[in-house]
Amino acid sequence: MNPAVRAMVRTPMGRLVPWMGVVRFVGRKSARRYAVPVGIHDVDGIATVFTDRPWRLNFGDGTRVTVAQGGRERHGRAVLVEDREQVGIALLKALQRTSRPSNLGLKITKGHQPTANELAALGSSMIQIRYDVST
């Protein structure tokens, strides 16, 4: 599935799943090039990726990235945030903006409105991407 997502988000067809994207970056220790398919969510005007995967550690001190999403590429700087309270609040805001919790990798019982504290218990980190002004 990942190769298909990597190819699709670069084309106009990528607009069909606007929350999907590919983050490209260089590993901080290995200098290896990565292209990781992710869900990208707007939280207060900041592109945000929720993940606890090990590759997130490349963003601890901030890293330059290229993001392919919705048929276009943008450049920016991505920073890892590991404060559970901030992550919980951001997850709640992203959840309020999406029509499907599964877009965030969440399964929520119908009628239940999770709190920021409940969501903070699910994930401990997120990557915030601030795009360059010119892109």
Image (spheres, grey):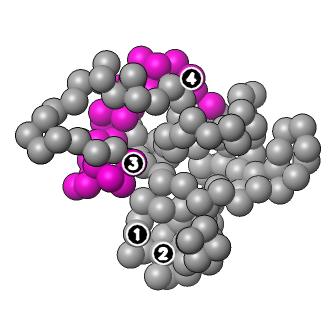
Q: CA distance from mark 3 to mark 4?
A: 18 Å
Pointer 2 local density, CA inside 10 Å: few below 14, some 14–19, many at least 20: many
- 35 vs 68, left or right, is right
- 12 vs 31, left or right, is left
- Please name the amino acid that badge 1 sits on: Val
In the rendered image, residue 103 lying in the magenta stretch gets the answer: yes
**Upstream in the sequence, badge 3 or badge 4?**
4
- Please name the amino acid that badge 2 sits on: Gly
**Upstream in the sequence, badge 3 or badge 1?**
1
Q: Quadrant of the N terminus?
A: bottom right
- 31 vs 95, left or right, is right
**Is residue 51 among the parts visible in the rendering?**
yes
Q: Quarter-wise, where is residue 122 in the image?
A: top left
Q: Is 11 located above or below residue 36 in the figure?
A: below
Q: Is 12 located above or below residue 62 in the figure?
A: below
Nearer to us: label 3 or label 1: 3
Pointer 4 local density, CA inside 10 Å: few below 14, some 14–19, many at least 20: some
**Upstream in the sequence, badge 4 or badge 1?**
1
Q: Which residue is mark 4?
A: 82
- Please name the amino acid that badge 3 sits on: Gly
Q: Quadrant of the C terminus?
A: bottom right
* Circles 3 and 2: CB atoms closer than 8 Å: no
Q: Which residue is mark 3?
A: 105
Q: Magenta region's main secondary structure?
A: helix
Q: CA distance from mark 4 to mark 1?
A: 27 Å
Which residue sits at x=39%, y=22%?
A: 121
Q: Which residue is mark 2?
A: 14
